[in-house]
Image: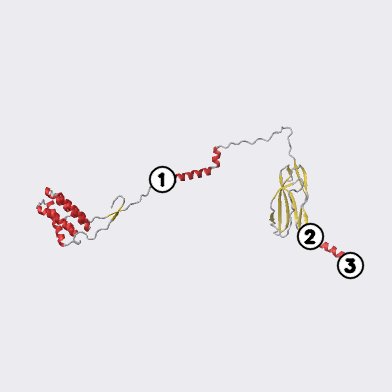
Amino acid sequence: MIKRLFFNYTLLAVVLICGIKSASAQGILVDARLQDYTIKLGDQTKLFLVVTQAAKAHVDFPKLGDTITSTVQIVSANKPDTVVDQKNKNMITITQAYIITSFDAGVHTMPAFNFITHGSIVKSNELTIQVQSVKIDTTKSIYDIKKPVIVTYTIVDWVHDHLVWIIGGLILIALIVGLIYYLRNKPKIEPVIKITKPVIPPHTIAIEKLKELQAKKLWQQDEVKLYYIELTDILREYLEQRYDVRTHEQTTDEILYSLKSCEIAADNRAELQRILTTADLVKFAKEKPTPVDNEAAIEKALAFVQKTQQTTQPKETEGGADGAV
């Protein structure tokens, strides 16, 4: 009795397990097809393994090596392609493509492919491919393989292949030549040598010129007018540099008026007026002073310059290499 019960329960368990596997395999469709069912010897075609399944289901594709049968070889395998069913989003179609070929003429049958899902095996359909042999015309002569064609490689071909490097090299050479030319012809900057020269005070210049005039002895040679012209020119130049007033092309009255605001003692101002007035009489009125007056005129001019000379010496100035002040 106990043995019979054990046998019944065991049989029931096997039936339930088979039923579960059968139910899990339901809803999964597999298919195998070829792109071309007839090919020539050595040509290639595509093998498609297609599975239509629920999106959450798991199906293992057949594991194929280098060959499917002894006469059909696999060249390469593509990555699986998954497409969602637009009418039922819960269903997907997975396609695995292989490139196959055959070098044996005839009709070759590929057995059904096994797909595994939840421990169950789902088989595809069988495939048959026909491989046609290449017809050979035995009436024609057999020729040897043609020799390689010799292609000449000219300088034009070389330039075309290296055009970028040639242009770049020419630009680089032009830049180097331009740089060398610029460096060779670049103007040299010579250092400026500063020469410091003392400024000669106006009274020193005037005294030297008055002494030179005295040494000429013009009035002794009956050149009285020229003597007074040079005398007044020396005094005008001294007044212009000493007091910074315009004296040239001005009359004696205009000069004295310009000196009105300058710090000149009254006796020195009067002495200057007498010298310039005497000179005007000689130049314009043709008056002839005595020899004593002529000699006294230059002495008074020297005395005026010495009395009105600037006590503070002017600053030294700097000149360039050419000595310009």
Residue 280: image location, x then y, percent: 13, 53
- Where is residue 161 shown, x and y percent of the image? 56, 42
Q: Which residue is mark 3?
A: 2
Give 173 or 125, whichever is nearer the viewer: 173
Q: CA distance from mark 3 to mark 1?
A: 120 Å
Please state which of the two labelled residues, at mark 3 or mark 1, is closer to the viewer. Answer: 1
Q: Marks 2 and 1: which is nearer the front?
A: 1
Residue 121 on image: x %, y %: 78, 56
Instruction: Depth check: give the residue in front, 275 or 102.
Output: 275
Which quadrant of the figure has residue 308? bottom left
Horizontal and vertical percent for residue 149? 63, 36
Marks 2/1: CA distance?
A: 95 Å
Residue hosting label 1: 184
Residues 45 and 194: in front is 194
Mark 2 or mark 1, which has the lower sequence index?
2
Which SS class for mark 1? Answer: helix
- Marks 3 and 2, Cα distance to the nearest angstrom? 29 Å
In the image, which disc is placed on residue 21?
2
Of residues 152 and 123, the one nearer the viewer is 152
Badge 3: residue crowd in 10 Å (few <14, some 14–19, many ≥20): few
